[in-house]
Image (tube, rainbow, N blue to C red):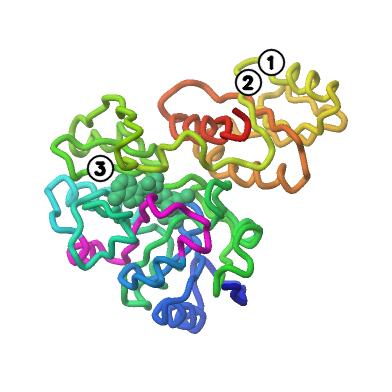
Amino acid sequence: MPRQTVVLSVDAEQPDPQVVERAAAVLQRGGLVAFPTETVYGLGANALDEAAVHSIFAAKGRPANNPLIVHVADPRDVRELVADWPPAAERLAAVFWPGPLSLVLPKRPLVPDAVTAGAATVAVRMPDHRLALALIAAAGVPIAAPSANRSLAVSPTQAEHVLKGLAGRIDLLLDAGPTSGGLESTVLDLSRPRPRLLRPGLISAAAIEAVIGPLDRGELAPDPAAPLVSPGMLARHYAPRATLECVAADSAARVVELQSQGLHVGWMPLATDEVNTIAGVETIPMPLDPAAYASKLYAAMHMLDDRGVDRIVVELPPETPPWLAIHDRLRRAGAPTERDG
Ligand code: TXA
Ligand code: MG
């Protein structure tokens, strides 16, 4: 079902109410609207409209067993979605919402099974972005929104990234410039006796523990027969088209080696003083600060893909807690696919 994709530019700080109303009307009639959040661009639909939710999966080519995050414009609006709102959720929402933290809780029957991939839980969050909040409020319904990319591709942090994957597959794209955060939200499971991190993100485990105490840090037991715990945990995810490899030390030597094999190489070194460009290599120096690095990571991968490189060499950032979510995404972007193996 091809769609005519309209693109509208909007001011991120002072969104034009007429544009917001127009986008909200598209959502209300079951359409698909891509919009920025503080993390990445989301692909939104009315979370309570089962057919609209199915069309999200169709547009992304997303497997039906990967559940969606439901976005609200007011913390009170989660009460109609979740069957239980424990004190830990109340405290976390008070501290981190609006913000990049998704909370997994038992769902109410109102939430369609399509949203949760048949699970008894639903992930909810309130994004920290004026346009996103205005849009959700104007639509008057909770908005299911995965990242606005084709399944398994790199998440979009700019409107152009959305169009690369979804032009002709969505009704409307609100372009409010690059997102600030750059990595998807932290996903925390509060539906179990001991809270557990399902996906690391911009809000760290330590910051969460400072509010609600220790998390269950045990390894997630991989059981191939069980339903997916959180498909964001799949090895291969967020990957560029080019093969990506992470190198701990002397990434320049690896770049030169690959180039000598005739490969067109993209290079993402850490921006220390010694970064020299190498002729013929597409070089994107990466910031030494984790927040700045996160906000640039996906844009760098998109750019190198656009330049048609065969291989991307990433110099690994330090193995310290502030870099955890970045290491997680780099690992997934570099994980071999079935094709490779
Ligand atoms: O920052 C973000 O979270 C962005 C913006 C648009 O809000 N959204 C996003 O959505 O990254 P998506 O669909 O790409 O990732 C959602 C993650 C997946 O890892 C999914 O498995 C997990 O959240 N998830 C959603 N509902 C869940 C549930 N009921 N139980 C466990 N994991 C869930
Ligand atoms: Mg995604």
* Residue 163 at x, y percent in the picture: 64, 62
Give me the residue at 29% from left, 42% from top.
Answer: 188
Q: Sort mark 1 into few (<14), some (14-19) or many (20+) by Cα contacts within 10 Å.
A: few
Quadrant of the snapshot with the C terminus: top right
Residue 150 on the magenta segment: no
According to the image, label 3 marks what residue? 189
Say if 100 sits above or below 29 in the image.
above
Asked whether the beta carbons under mark 2 and mark 1 sit within 8 Å of each other, the answer is: yes
The amino acid at mark 2 is: Val
* Residue 169 at x, y percent in the picture: 58, 68
Say if 308 sits above or below 99 in the image.
above
Q: Is mark 3 within 8 Å of ligand 1?
A: yes
Q: Can residue 100 be seen in this view?
A: no
According to the image, label 2 marks what residue? 247
The amino acid at mark 3 is: Asp
Q: Is residue 332 left or right of residue 135?
A: right
Residue closest to the eye, 199 or 262: 262
* Residue 125 at x, y percent in the picture: 32, 56
Helix, strand or loop for disc 2: strand
The mark lying in front, picked from 2 and 1, is 2
Q: How far apart are marks 2 and 1 (CA)?
A: 7 Å
> Magenta segment range?
56-81
Q: Distance between the residues labelled 2 and 3?
A: 32 Å
According to the image, label 1 marks what residue? 250
Residue 64 on the magenta segment: yes
| Residue 113 found in image quarter | bottom left
Of callouts 2 and 3, which one flags the residue occurring earlier in the amino acid sequence? 3
